[in-house]
Structure formats: C-alpha cells, structure tokens
C-alpha cells in the first residue's frame, strides 16, 4: 500500500463505474482527510481483478452510450441487469451469489492484504469491495454508502443480517429499500449524500447560504444577469448528441453573452473531444461564454467542477448522483435516465419539486427565459435547498469516526 493510505482515521474505497461513486469518495475525503483507495487500478489489481474491473467498466460505458442509439439493444440488456425488482416480488440473489464467487476466486485480495495490521475501518462507495470484504471476513469495520435513492439487491450480501457492515443512505426512501431486502433498521443511517465542502462550507453551511443568496438574485424575475448553464458528462460520456442539440439551440445566446455554458468532461477524453469539436464546428472555440472542464486527474477535475458550481444557475443532467446537488439550491433539468436507479432518482426529485424534465432541447432557451420570469427557476432552487439533506459528508465522517450522529437532523427530510 502507498504511504498516503496509511494516514487518516479510515480508508475510503471506490471505483470507476460512472462518476458517482468516485465523486462521493472525493467529497468525503475533502471533508475528513481520509485517503481514497481506487480498488479498480494499480497497485490493487492484477490478474482476475483487472479482468473483472475492465469488463464491468466496458459494459457500463458502452451500455450507457447505447442509450443514444435507435435500436438500444446493448442498453436494454444493460438496463435489465440493473433493474430493481418490484416490492411484491422476492429479489433475485443471482448477482449477490456471483459476487460471493468472485471473493472465492480472491478478487480484491490484493487490497485487503495491503491493509495495516490494526484493521482500519473501510468506507466503501461501491458495493463490490464491500461485499468481498465481508465474504473474506475482514476484521475491521465496514461501512457502505449508497449513492442513489434506490438500488439493486446486489448492494446487499446474501445474508442481509451480516453484522459487520453499516449502511449510509442519502434519503429516507433508501432506508425503506434496504429494509425491504431484510437489512436491520439499527444498521441503517440516513445521512444524506456527501456534498463538496467547498460548496457547503463547514457544517454550518455558511458557504452554501452565501452562494445561494447570490444565485437567488440572478434567478429572480426581472433579473437581466446572464445565467450560467452546466452540462456535466457522465463517466461513460453519454448524451453527446443532446449536448450538440443544446449548443445549437443556445447558439445566438452564447454569441451575444446572454447565457454562459460550462461543459464538464471529468477525465473522459471521449467527452472532451466531442465538446471541443462541437464548439469548433459552431465557431465557439474562442467564445468567452463557453468553458470546458477536463483534467486527466479525475479528482482535480472534480475540484474544478465544484468551484465552477458556485456560479452555476441551472444544471442539465441525467438523474445520476447529481440529483443530490439540488440541495445546493441549483435547479435541475433532467435528460432521460439511464437505468432503473436513475429513473427512481428522477422520480424522487420530481415528486419533491426540485427538478423538471427536459421537454424539448430545441425550446430550452425559451423555457429558460419564461421560467425565470414566472419564478419557476427560483422555486426549483428553493425546494432543492429546503428538501434535500446538505450535511451528508459531515454526518458520514462522524459516524465512521465513532462520533454520535444526531438523527434528529433528518426529521425535516421528505420520505
């Protein structure tokens, strides 16, 4: 293990399966100082580990991108793998049994063997290493953060009463899903999703409140200040076609500076190439009202993304982990979900009036103008700020560190 992972009160494990799990891990690391172990890359993979991770990541990437195709054959198969079963049907254990098989084949063993002999606590933001740690009988404490409102049964071990794991979930609905799988209530903690501390400030949320007050002034009816739109690509780089439609619809506004557009590509060179080519084709590559965020170091790109969020007024995104960023008081406009978990994320925010669907990209500029005039944008911002949890990173850190979490904090959350 590298020296950087020997510090801190616990170790955060994560992997690239979309950006959500790594984004949560990075935010938690920024709150706590705990190191992040990428268990899907060197020095923790080799042999079968590399085969499993590369295969899973390719399925995720190409399955997600196939959502843009006409046939969507690969996407439909991929979507079927992630489908969350209805409550009246017993959940399938096929995925959980496959994970147990992987543990028997010693997947993840290199990471576990690298840990200190005092068995530090592990905080997992993706299920594979969490389940393997349980099946391999890791002697330290395990915590698993779930990054969606609802999730597949594979996130739970075959025996839901497994004692050496606590679950941290973003909203009360997530706790209901865990209990439907048989997880005891005493091991479920409704903490909220970890947001970036640069956007929240300390647990008093001073930075969030200050940024929101400025954003309110831009969103209010009568304001003529140019609005800033953020389009964050997913880890798979899906929906490049919709970005092209968006830029085409905003072309006049971008040229005269009445709207700004930020495209966040993470470390995805496929997404970067699409965005850069698009701006070149429309003569916007030198435009001061467009910006592309990219860094080959994914965590550095997250840092740039978080800083940019402070001036963002609307986020156009599929309903991934980005739904929880509505808590910052940023209106969300949803592209179609990819996977059943995203469909349920979308439903949760729509039900709580924190987001709207993108009805027509072609008409987006008109909708944007009208929504500011009618107060809809401001209302979306206020509902996100009021109804979604904002101190998740601090609550999770206190929980894993052994400090008592004030469960009363969550009395106001919408079930």
Image (cartoon, rainbow, N blue to C red):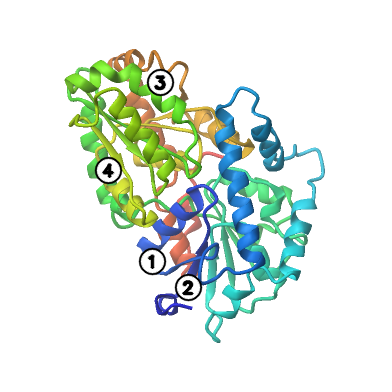
Q: Is residue 341 placed above or below 379 in the rendered structure? A: below
Question: Which residue is disc 4 drawn over?
Answer: 308
Instruction: Determine the residue positioned at 30% across, 19% down.
Output: 250
Q: CA distance from mark 2 to mark 3?
A: 44 Å
- N-terminal of the pair, mark 3 or mark 1, is 1
- N-terminal of the pair, mark 4 or mark 2, is 2
Q: Crowding near pointer 3: few (<14 within 10 Å), some, many (20+)? A: some
Determine whether the residue tagged by mark 3 lies in a helix, strand or loop: helix
Mark 4–mark 1 contact, CB under 8 Å?
A: no
- N-terminal of the pair, mark 2 or mark 3, is 2
Determine whether the residue tagged by mark 4 lies in a helix, strand or loop: helix
Determine whether the residue tagged by mark 1 lies in a helix, strand or loop: helix
Nearer to me, 219 or 239: 239
Instruction: Determine the residue positioned at 24% across, 27% down.
Output: 284
Q: Which mark is residue 10?
A: 2
Determine whether the residue tagged by mark 2 lies in a helix, strand or loop: strand
Mark 1–mark 2 contact, CB under 8 Å?
A: yes
Residue 301 image offset from top left, x and y in percent: 34, 51
Question: Which residue is disc 1 drawn over?
Answer: 32
Q: Is residue 20 placed above or below 213 in the rendered structure? A: below
Q: CA distance from mark 1 to mark 2?
A: 9 Å
Q: CA distance from mark 4 to mark 2?
A: 29 Å
Q: Crowding near pointer 4: few (<14 within 10 Å), some, many (20+)? A: some
In front: label 2 or label 3: 3
Q: Quadrant of residue 48?
A: bottom right
The answer to whether one can see residue 164 in this image is no
Nearer to me, 262 or 161: 262
In front: label 3 or label 1: 3
In front: label 4 or label 1: 4
Nearer to me, 61 or 348: 61
What is the tally of numbered marks visible in this picture?
A: 4
């Amino acid at each position: 293990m590298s020296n950087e992972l020997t510090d801190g009160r616990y170790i955060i494990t994560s992997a690239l399966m979309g950006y959500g799990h790594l984004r949560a891990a990075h935010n938690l690391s920024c709150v706590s100082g705990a190191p992040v172990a990428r268990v899907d890359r060197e020095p923790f993979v080799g042999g079968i580990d590399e085969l499993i991770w590369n295969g899973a990541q390719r399925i995720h990437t190409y399955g997600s991108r196939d959502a843009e195709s006409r046939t969507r054959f690969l996407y439909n198969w991929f979507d079927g793998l992630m489908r969350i079963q209805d409550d009246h049907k017993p959940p399938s254990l096929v995925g959980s049994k496959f994970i147990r098989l992987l543990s028997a084949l010693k997947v993840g063993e290199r990471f576990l063997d690298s840990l200190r002999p005092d068995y530090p606590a592990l905080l997992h933001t993706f299920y594979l290493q969490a389940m393997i740690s349980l099946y391999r009988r890791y002697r330290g404490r395990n915590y698993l953060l779930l990054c969606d409102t609802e999730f597949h049964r594979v996130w739970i071990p075959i025996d839901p009463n497994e004692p050496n794991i606590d679950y941290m979930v973003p909203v009360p609905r997530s706790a209901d899903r865990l209990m439907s799988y048989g997880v005891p209530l005493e091991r479920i903690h409704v903490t909220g999703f970890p947001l970036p501390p640069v956007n929240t400030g300390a647990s008093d949320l001073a930075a969030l409140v200050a940024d929101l007050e400025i954003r309110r002034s831009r969103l209010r009816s009568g304001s003529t200040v140019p609005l800033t739109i953020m389009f964050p690509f997913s880890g798979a780089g899906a929906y490049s076609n919709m970005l092209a439609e968006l830029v085409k619809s905003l072309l006049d506004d971008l040229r005269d500076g009445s709207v700004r557009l930020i495209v966040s590509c993470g470390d995805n060179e496929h997404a970067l190439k699409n965005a850069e080519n698009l701006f070149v084709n429309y003569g916007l590559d030198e435009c001061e009202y467009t910006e592309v965020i990219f860094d080959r170091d994914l965590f550095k790109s997250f840092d740039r993304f978080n800083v940019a969020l402070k001036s963002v007024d609307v986020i156009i995104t599929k309903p991934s982990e980005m739904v929880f960023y509505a808590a910052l008081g940023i209106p969300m406009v949803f592209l179609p979900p990819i996977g059943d978990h995203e469909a349920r994320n979308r439903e949760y925010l729509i039900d709580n009036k924190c987001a709207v669907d993108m009805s027509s990209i072609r008409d987006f500029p008109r909708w944007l103008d009208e929504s500011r005039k009618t107060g809809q944008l401001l209302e979306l911002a206020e509902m996100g700020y009021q109804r979604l949890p904002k101190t998740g990173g601090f609550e999770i850190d206190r929980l894993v560190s052994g400090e008592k979490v004030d469960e009363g904090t969550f009395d106001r959350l919408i079930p």
